Image (cartoon, helix red, strand yellow):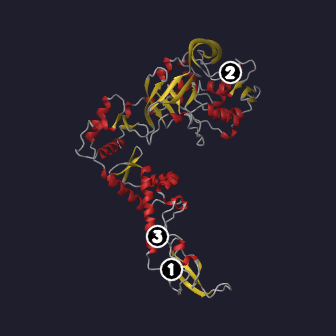
Amino acid sequence: MSGALLLPNEYWLSLQVTPQDVENLHTFLFERETPLAVRDLCSEFIEARIRMERAAAEKKQKSDSKTFFPKEKYQVGDELVFPALEWRQGTVTAMRAGVNPSIDNFDVLTVAMDDRSEHMFAANLESHFLNEAPIPVPERDEMNPALILNEHGNLIEKKLEAAFALDEGLVKIAGRWFPRALLIDIGQGQLNLAEAVLDVSGGEPLATDALIKEIELPAGVNPKLAEFSLNYALQCDNRFDEVGPAGQILWCLHRLEPDFVRETPPPLRYAEIEHDRDDLTAAMLNLEAQLDDELTPSDESDSREGISSITISLIYPHLRAGTLPMSARARKFFPTAYESSRVRFTLVDGKTKQRMPAWVVLANGYVFGLREWYKSHQLIPGSLVVVRRGEKPGEVIVEVKGQRSSKDWVRTVLVGKDGGFVFAMLKQPISAEFNERMVIHVPDFKSLDPIWEKKRPFDELVLLVMRELTKSNPQGHVHAQELYAAVNLVRRVPPAPLFALLATSPAFKHVGDLHFRLNEELA
């Protein structure tokens, strides 16, 4: 048996981060004087744990206990250490003569181990492979810190994050940790200067180094320490908001952020509708995934990282608000942040190369900043927008699936003075490709506002919309996708509660391929 240290997988799977571990990392950060992400600290943590366990093993090997070899004779009370059992220790509590016709005289020892278990060992045995002293050998691959990090890094990272969050001696900004004791004091006057600089920028976010140039900090300070200290002071002041994508820190004043970045635009506000997702059929779930609704729960198993672009069919609420949905598919294209719920980035028109400031509102699942772009392209509900990754970090390309401006027969919503509405097939100017089932021309967006304000009961509203849609179909059939687009003209509703109603209410009869008709007697 070699004397090499070997920590099994179970060691890393079940480990608990101790106060000593955190103190060691405190010391490491003090020595480096550089804020580090938890992932960067994982390597130091793993190496420190290996050093600690190796030292503990060596201490056992160098203890006053006798090293157990089967050839030796022992007495009750002898303290032994066992190389073959990872140098565990035990005390001989009983001894008797062994009985085996094929072996001459030998002893059987009863040993109480240090973990309170009891084991029996043969001693006074001349021939045994464990009679040779263990020869140290190079560490096995299992003790390679890089391999351990690769296999267990995510779990270790989560445990360190949890331990750091409970330690008042550490502070975190933009995903990086640093000892509070090393921070430079940033005074109220310096924060007021930072506010003035951001005021002058007129809402355009600025990087920390741009702010440092305008405020007075002590000379000769480590630049990284100065930057982290100012970032932390700004984070603790509710006038400032960190809005940079992951890996980049940008600061903005809360009061200069657009209204509908700080709060959800009215057309996107959803009043929870009770429903059971188990009522949705496989076909409904498949359609739900295609609709790119930000209110649809994200499927963690979705691993389509390789897709280069997606095409989104706009629904009325997003067109009215000037937003795009941050659906499960779309989320992969837009920047994220370590902590901030709002991220400033740039949209680029794929054809004209026009650059547009925009915001990802992570908490509420939408991208804000497309209102004027939608107007310039004369988009309507159902228009197709292509989203793909930008050529530079912090940029996302959007492009209209365009066609030459022409007139086409499309479903159009007409609102009467009494607040009633009807759908009619009318010729309308069309400047972009559209989804056949979701296209609905709205001559006047404001005309729909009174219908939103009526706030009819959900079931009643769906029946009303369904009746109007069936009038334009000789068979009286309406596809679930058509109904979803039409209901969202008058109330913000995600697919699931609508589809659940279609699946469970006797007022709707499924006639195949997600087409439904009204059962008027029950409706």
Pointer 1 with pointer 3, Cβ within 8 A:
no
Image position, residue 265 (x, y; %): 49, 29
Please, what is the three-letter code of the amino acid marked with disc 2? Leu
Three-letter amino acid code at disc 3? Ala
Tell me which amino acid carries mark 1.
Leu
Residue where numbered disc 2 is placed: 469
Quarter of the rendering occupied by the N terminus? bottom right
* Residue at x 35% of width, y 57% of height: 27
Q: Earlier in the sequence, mark 2 or mark 1?
A: 1
Residue in the picture at 49% in, 52% down: 158
Displayed quadrant of residue 404: top right
**Which label sits in the foreground, 2 or 1?**
1
Secondary structure of the residue carrying tag 3 is: helix
Q: Which mark is residue 420?
A: none
The residue closer to the viewer here, 76 or 194, is 76
Question: Where is mark 3, residue-wise?
Answer: 57
